[in-house]
C-alpha cells in the first residue's frame, strides 16, 4: 500500500487529488500540509490522515509519494525537497515559474531515482486520446494547421479562497496568469496530438478585464494569444482566456492534407472527423472536465500505477519541459514584441 502525502490543500487538492487517491485501492492518504493548518486538520480528519505543521515535517514522515498542489511559485522548491527526501512526486501544472527551476526539478528526479510526474491531464481526455490514435493512423494525413483554445470566466470561483483577490491574480504567488494556468495545457496538448515540438512562438499577453477587489488591474495576464510553428512544419494558434463569460471553450481543430479533426468543438459530438472526400465520422467518447463539472482525471491512477510497476510515468517532468519552454518563450515574445525561437 503506497502512502500518500498532499502538500497544498486548496481546490485542486480537494476536488481532484484527494478523492482520486481515496478511490484508488493501492494507496492510502496519510499526510497533509497546508499554509492554513486548520484546513489541513479538517481534511486530515475526513481522510483519516495526519496534518503536519510544515512541509519539512511531512517529508520526514513515512510517505512514499506526494502531490504538490501549492501555489505556482513554490512548486520547484517543494518538489526538489520531496525528491531529495526520497519521495515520488506528482506536481500540478504549471511545472514551475522559471525554465531553470523546471530543469532543476528534472535533474533532481534523475539524481534521486524517483518519479516526477506533471498533472497535464488533457493528454488523458478520451477525445484527445482517440484523436491522437486517428492522427497517428493517418486519418487526416499530414497535419498542416491547427487552432486550440481554453477559455472560461476565470479562476475566481475555483480558488479555495474564492473572490477577486484569489492568489491566481497575484504575481507574487502565481507568477503567471492565464498563459500558465490554461496555456500550458493546450501547449502540451498540441505537441501530444501532432507528435511535433514547438520551435517558434509569437505571442501577445495582456490584462483586458480582470480587477482586484479594489478595482486595480490584476498583476498577471488574463488573456494570451499565440502563434506556434512546429518542427514538423505545422503552424497554428493557441488562445487562452479568463474573460470568456459565456460557455467554456476547450476546443481543438486540426487541418491535415486528408481531412479535419474537430475535438470538443461540436454541440453534440465530442470528436468529428471530416475526410477530404466529404465523408464525416462522429465519435462520442466523453465530455471534457470543466470547473463546474469535475470527473476523474486519470492522473492519480497513472501515478500510482507507475510507482507499483516501477515504470516511467506517462507524463514525466522531462516530457513537460518542451511545453514549458514554449510557455516561457510566449511570455518573452509578448514582452519583446517579436517572435522567439524555442531551444528544444
Image: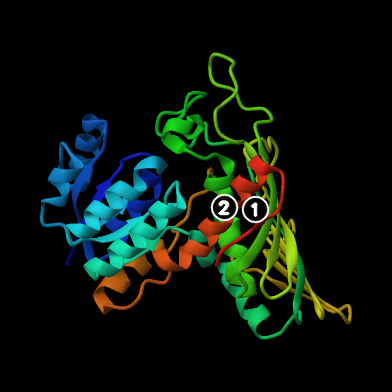
Q: CA distance from mark 2 to mark 1?
A: 18 Å
Query: Residue at the spot x=37%, y=69% of the render?
Result: 302
Query: Residue at the spot x=35%, y=52% of the render?
Result: 17
Kind of element beneath mark 1: loop
> Which quarter of the rendering shows the C terminus?
bottom right
Q: Which residue is mark 1?
A: 250
Q: Which residue is mark 2?
A: 327
Please say whether residue 49 is visible from this viewpoint: no
Q: Nearer the viewer, residue 20 or 63?
A: 63
Image vertical order of residue 122 relative to residue 261, above or below: above
Q: Left or right: 61 with respect to 80?
A: left
Q: Position of residue 113 (x, y in %)?
A: 24, 71
Q: Position of residue 213 (x, y in %)?
A: 53, 17
Q: Nearer the viewer, residue 17 or 242?
A: 242
Q: Left or right: 294 with respect to 179?
A: left
- Furthest toward the left, the residue is 61
Marks 2/1 in contact by CB < 8 Å: the verdict is: no
Image vertical order of residue 22 relative to residue 178, above or below: below
Please say whether residue 62 is visible from this viewpoint: yes
Amino acid at each position: 500500500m503506497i502512502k500518500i502525502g498532499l502538500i497544498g490543500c486548496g481546490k485542486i487538492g480537494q476536488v481532484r487529488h484527494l478523492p482520486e487517491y481515496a478511490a484508488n485501492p493501492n494507496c492510502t492518504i496519510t499526510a497533509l500540509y497546508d499554509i492554513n493548518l486548520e484546513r489541513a486538520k479538517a481534511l486530515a480528519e475526513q481522510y483519516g490522515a495526519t496534518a503536519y505543521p510544515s512541509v519539512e515535517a511531512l517529508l520526514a514522515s513515512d510517505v512514499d509519494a506526494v502531490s504538490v498542489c501549492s501555489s505556482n511559485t513554490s512548486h520547484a522548491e517543494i518538489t526538489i525537497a520531496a525528491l531529495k527526501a526520497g519521495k515520488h512526486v506528482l506536481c500540478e501544472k504549471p511545472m514551475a515559474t522559471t525554465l531553470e527551476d523546471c530543469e532543476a526539478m528534472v535533474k533532481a528526479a534523475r539524481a534521486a531515482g524517483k518519479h516526477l510526474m506533471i498533472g497535464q491531464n488533457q493528454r488523458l481526455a478520451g477525445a484527445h486520446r482517440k484523436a491522437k490514435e486517428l492522427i497517428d493512423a493517418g486519418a487526416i494525413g499530414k497535419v498542416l494547421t491547427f487552432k486550440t483554445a481554453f477559455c472560461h470566466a476565470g479562476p475566481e470561483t475555483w480558488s479555495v479562497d474564492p473572490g477577486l483577490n484569489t492568489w491566481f491574480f497575484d504575481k507574487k504567488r502565481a507568477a503567471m496568469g492565464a498563459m500558465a494556468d490554461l496555456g500550458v495545457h493546450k501547449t502540451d496538448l498540441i505537441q501530444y496530438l501532432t507528435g511535433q515540438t514547438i520551435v517558434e512562438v509569437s505571442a501577445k499577453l495582456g490584462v483586458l478585464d480582470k480587477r482586484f477587489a479594489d478595482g486595480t488591474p490584476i498583476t498577471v495576464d488574463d488573456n494570451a494569444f499565440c502563434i506556434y510553428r512546429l518542427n514538423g512544419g505545422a503552424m497554428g494558434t493557441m488562445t487562452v482566456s479568463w474573460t470568456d463569460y459565456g460557455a467554456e471553450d476547450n476546443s481543438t481543430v486540426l487541418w491535415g492534407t486528408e481531412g479535419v479533426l474537430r475535438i470538443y468543438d461540436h454541440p453534440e459530438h465530442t470528436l468529428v472527423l471530416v475526410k477530404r472526400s466529404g465523408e464525416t465520422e462522429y465519435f462520442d467518447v466523453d465530455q471534457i472536465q470543466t470547473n463546474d463539472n469535475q470527473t476523474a482525471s486519470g492522473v492519480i491512477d497513472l501515478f500510482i500505477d507507475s510507482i507499483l510497476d516501477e515504470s516511467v510515468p506517462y507524463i514525466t517532468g522531462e516530457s513537460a519541459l518542451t511545453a514549458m519552454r514554449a510557455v516561457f518563450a510566449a511570455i518573452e515574445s509578448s514582452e519583446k514584441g517579436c517572435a522567439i525561437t524555442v531551444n528544444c
